[in-house]
Image: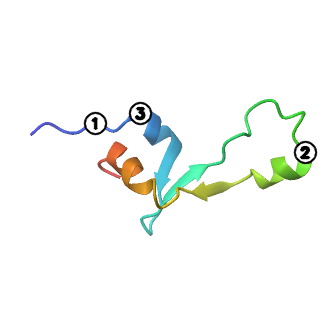
Amino acid sequence: MPKMKTKSGAKKRFRVRGSGSVKRSQAFKRHILTKKSTKSKRQLRGSAGVHATNVASVMAMMPYA
């Protein structure tokens, strides 16, 4: 059997933690930041986990993760 390819967009956006949960970065932090409040920009820092309803589709895009 040939190897399965990982979706290149998914490998740039997601990492699998040691516990098996999937880590993602926050959206809405790239541009048009002047109209966003300091509080909202501060709360978008750091990483978040992928919701449980989406984990299966993310893992299907990364077969070897």
Q: Is residue 11 left or right of residue 24?
A: left
Kindly identify the residue that appears in the image at 13 percent across and 36 percent down: 2
SS for tag 2? loop
In front: label 1 or label 2: 2
| Residue type for callout 1 | Lys
Q: Is residue 52 left or right of residue 46?
A: left
Q: Mark 3–mark 1 contact, CB under 8 Å? A: no
Q: Earlier in the sequence, mark 1 or mark 2?
A: 1
Q: Within 10 angstroms of label 1, few (less than 14), some, or many (20 or more) residues?
A: few
Q: Within 10 angstroms of label 3, few (less than 14), some, or many (20 or more) residues?
A: few
- Examine the rendered structure and indicate whether residue 34 appears above or below residue 23: above
In front: label 3 or label 2: 2
Q: Position of residue 29 (x, y in %)?
A: 74, 40
SS for tag 1? loop
Q: Within 10 angstroms of label 2, few (less than 14), some, or many (20 or more) residues?
A: few
Q: Mark 1–mark 2 contact, CB under 8 Å? A: no
Q: Identify the image quadrant of the N terminus.
A: top left
| Residue type for callout 3 | Ser
- Examine the rendered structure and indicate whether residue 59 appears above or below residue 31: below
Q: Position of residue 13 (x, y in %)?
A: 52, 42
Q: Position of residue 54 (x, y in %)?
A: 45, 53
Kindly identify the residue that appears in the image at 44 percent across and 66 percent down: 18
Q: Which residue is mark 1?
A: 5
**Tell me, what colour scheme is on the image?**
rainbow
Q: Which residue is mark 2?
A: 37
Q: Position of residue 23 (x, y in %)?
A: 53, 55
| Residue type for callout 2 | Ser
Q: Which residue is mark 3?
A: 8
Separation of residues labelled 3 and 2 (CA atoms): 33 Å
Q: Earlier in the sequence, mark 3 or mark 2?
A: 3
